[in-house]
Amino acid sequence: MIVEGAIVLLMFFGSPLELKEYTVRDGLSECLKAKRTIERNVKSPTQKTYEGSMRLSCKKLDVEVNDINSIVRFIDVDPKELTPFR
């Protein structure tokens, strides 16, 4: 099944930063909420903000998903869209 304009939470981590995980979210607000929750949970208690090497991004992308809503592939996506600093 192809989903046009799906909101996808992209997770980049490692050294160098690479796209490691991605999930379709129910909308932009839900994606941003999940992003904030993850950022809040990965920082240490002494930090006000997360300053590690993980980067999260919510983007609108065309994707193909399987029957359990997992992304099988990205459709006509510029590789630059799948980088942490774009």
Image: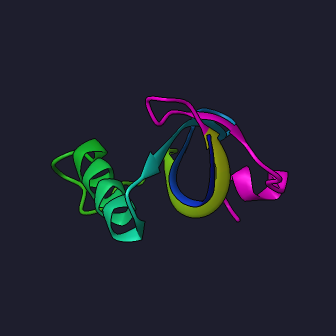
Q: State the image quarter where residue 14 is shown.
A: top right
Q: In this view, does 86 lie above or below 12?
A: below
The quarter of the rendered structure image containing the N terminus is top right
Residue 20: say if magenta: no
Q: Nearer the viewer, residue 4 or 10?
A: 4
Q: Residue at point 83% right, 53% down?
A: 76
Say above or below: 49 vs 70: below
Residue that sits furthest to the bottom in the current view: 29
Q: Position of residue 56 (x, y in %)?
A: 49, 53
Residue 64, located in which quarter of the rendered image? top right
Residue range in magenta is 65-86
- Res 29 visible: yes
In the displayed orientation, state which residue is furthest to the left.
45
Q: Tell me residue 74's x, y (percent).
A: 72, 44
Question: Which quarter of the picture shows residue 31?
Answer: bottom left
Q: Is residue 67 magenta?
A: yes
Is residue 84 visible in this depiction of the protein? no
In the picture, the quarter occupied by the C terminus is bottom right
The answer to which of 71 and 57 lies nearer the viewer is 71
56 over 23 or under it: above or below? below
Q: Residue at x 48, y 48 (%)?
A: 24
